[in-house]
Image: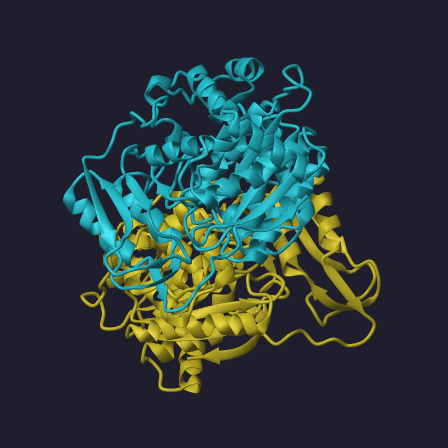
Chain colours: A cyan, B yellow
Amino acid sequence: MNAVDVIAKKRDGGELSRAEIDLFVHGYARDEIPDYQAAAWAMAVFLNGMTRQETIDLTMSMAASGETLDLHDVAPIVVDKHSTGGVGDKTTIAVAPWVAACGLPVGKMSGRGLGFSGGTLDKLEAIPGFRTSLDIEQFKAQLARVGVVVAGQTQQLAPADGKLYALRDVTATVPSLPLIASSVMSKKIAAGADAIVLDVKVGRGAFMKTLEEAEALARIMVEIGQGVGRRVSAVISDMNQPLGHAVGNALETVEALETLRGRGPADFYEHCLVIAEQMLLLGSRASDLREARSQLEDALESGRAFEKALEWIAAQGGDVALLNGESYGLRAAPVVCELRAPRSAVVSGIDAMQVGLAAVDLGAGRHKKGDPVDHAVGIVLKAKVGDHVQAGAPLLTVHANSAAHCSRACQRLLGAYSWAEDDVSAAPLIYKVIG
Amino acid sequence: MNAVDVIAKKRDGGELSRAEIDLFVHGYARDEIPDYQAAAWAMAVFLNGMTRQETIDLTMSMAASGETLDLHDVAPIVVDKHSTGGVGDKTTIAVAPWVAACGLPVGKMSGRGLGFSGGTLDKLEAIPGFRTSLDIEQFKAQLARVGVVVAGQTQQLAPADGKLYALRDVTATVPSLPLIASSVMSKKIAAGADAIVLDVKVGRGAFMKTLEEAEALARIMVEIGQGVGRRVSAVISDMNQPLGHAVGNALETVEALETLRGRGPADFYEHCLVIAEQMLLLGSRASDLREARSQLEDALESGRAFEKALEWIAAQGGDVALLNGESYGLRAAPVVCELRAPRSAVVSGIDAMQVGLAAVDLGAGRHKKGDPVDHAVGIVLKAKVGDHVQAGAPLLTVHANSAAHCSRACQRLLGAYSWAEDDVSAAPLIYKVIG
């Protein structure tokens, strides 16, 4: 068996053994297998799929390709969360300190935005001074001291995944269920958390477009994690319209912090509660959902959740003086314009992907890896699905670098809306919890 | 549209336009598109196929990626032939001078052996001094002066194909109908022949295992050629057992020359006649098969065919003094052993691929591109399918570098034979002519 044999076997629909997967994954991580062979293999996997066992083997092979963190010297249980990516998804920034404020340590390695989908690290870096690049010792020390840490993935964890993910991005092999599942879970397993809550997004602004696909992805990820002794549950949540109101780095960070002060959008607040509840359950801090919710409400109302957020941000070097007042001192975009409703009607849809792409065009996201992002620009929705609006009422504001950017964004964003005459109810926020 | 978009379109089963194919093929030829993107694309083509129009567009795009020869200043019609590759296929060495001896110029760019399949250039290089590397001016000059030339493909012709072929070899994307058809035809079209006879092999020792596959390949190649104004026909011929008796470079060259002296194996002689007839028909040197055959028989019996072969070989620097006597002076292998029939029975099959692989193991062929070949070693069959043999009678001789090589080859080759008690007839030599 050599690399060509492994490619040919997958090309012909065969099931790869753990030894064959290891040969390929570790050979690729060690630069013994070239990019072009990995690319052909990834396309064969994309088109022919992988069995459950192959997906588990691929995950474990990638997790074993580098260092594996053990956090048990920090705390008996550390909890992590992961979102499959969406538009307006600033959940981590709210739930990580919120759960930590309930006494459960949260240690998370996070990612950057790409394409229509935003990234937590970019959002946090809207806070001047915030450091996302921590080494493993710093990560563990902060987790022990503050109880919450969110940093960029280190090169030492699952390096095979890092290499393969970069390759998939430029070879049209990203949206593949076994490749997504193994990529997510190899990193999560290597990063050492005992309990992992997966937020699997479904809809127009997500990689998974149908509930069926999302459920299949959620199930295989839960199986993989449980198969190696981690506590894992998956929340399947809606990503047809953006989550919350804000889309754009600083705007989202502010919205997440506002939510911890009890002033967040209703849908985002509820979404965070569901994710945080699952984290408390898996982390054995609550015995049922009611108890979890009551702890969370208490942490919020008492101000402890927001205080923990400031403590966390300060620990990572962020300038909390800018965040502590009634308004926030993050850099603002020079031009703000308003898109107004073209008619009196009910909003029946806001295409999250279009909103995400409009934000990328404004400079909030990346067309390709390594592009810089503008933290100030973005979009704030004023009306969401189900809302009745009068002609001329504000639909959203665009925060941009120029009037030309503003008007281009408004034009695109107008096309993201669909309308109805009668009452419309939004898609459910949460479809299912699997665990 | 960028490279990733083109890959994604083919991945999702879309039909690529000529502009999209040009973007990819010319970008790849100019090193603007990296190997890994071409590899992912090739696997997507392998698994999702290509329409007739895409295959034609790919062919023309690759042909247009470099220089295109025009041979009309040499002769009004130049004929070429191409085999899809097999075991014991020394047809070019016999038919090129034979057809030239009938007054029709033959100009052919040829290839090297890889895996179980031999290559004409390797066989010709068994003749001391024979030069296969000619530039375009030398190629045309010899074609004008001698009427026959067989040389290696120059770098200037269809460079995109050369690059893609090398990549396919290491990414398990070789046996794909549209990729094979476009690879063959792009080179043939760029090489300038007006008339092209394709010898499409089918069976155990061919890339196409079934008649259906072979016919599909033959039809698309004929369509491509005719679509750009070339005269093309395809002969579908058997490659279940090796063609003729000899397998190995010098052994095959001698057998081809012996055939031009009327002393070749019956099956190989007949196969050459069929290919040569098609060449004369397409080249307008004969108006029907009977006339073509009579011209060919005349050229052979008069000695003109063999003389033309010597003239051609001398023109390319080959030492014809070694070839001109009753025996041939090419370098012989140090050890020759005989495999004898294990029982009295009828030979019902000789697996051509096993024979080809045994020859590669002896050193006659290549495991990978760039490996050296040993011109002296090989196999000579003494019995073929349908022959009745007595126990102990010779089945074949092995020409090797050591007794150990001999005995290993004999063991493998014994397994290539299958046996029957009753009369067996061999598969037809020729299944079909398409044109």
Quarter of the picture holding the N terminus of chain B: bottom left
The answer to which quarter of the image holds residue A318 is top left
Q: Would you place residue B100 above or below residue A164 in this image?
A: below
Rendered location of residue A386, percent (x, y): 42, 58
Q: Nearer the viewer, residue A122 or A284?
A: A284
Q: Would you place residue A172 above or below residue B352 in this image?
A: above
Q: Is residue A138 visible?
A: yes
Quarter of the picture holding the C terminus of chain B: bottom left
In percent of the image, x 39 and y 40: which residue is there? A114
Q: Nearer the viewer, residue A411 or B385?
A: A411
Q: Is residue A187 visible?
A: no
Rendered location of residue B85, percent (x, y): 51, 60
The answer to which quarter of the image holds residue B334 is top right
Q: Would you place residue B92 above or below residue B104 in this image?
A: above
Rendered location of residue A171, percent (x, y): 42, 47
Q: Is A39 on the left or on the right of B101, as rendered?
A: right
Rendered location of residue B432, percent (x, y): 52, 79
Q: Is A39 on the left or on the right of A358, as rendered?
A: right
In percent of the image, x 79 and y 59: which residue is there? B341
Number of numbered discs visible in the structure rendering: 0
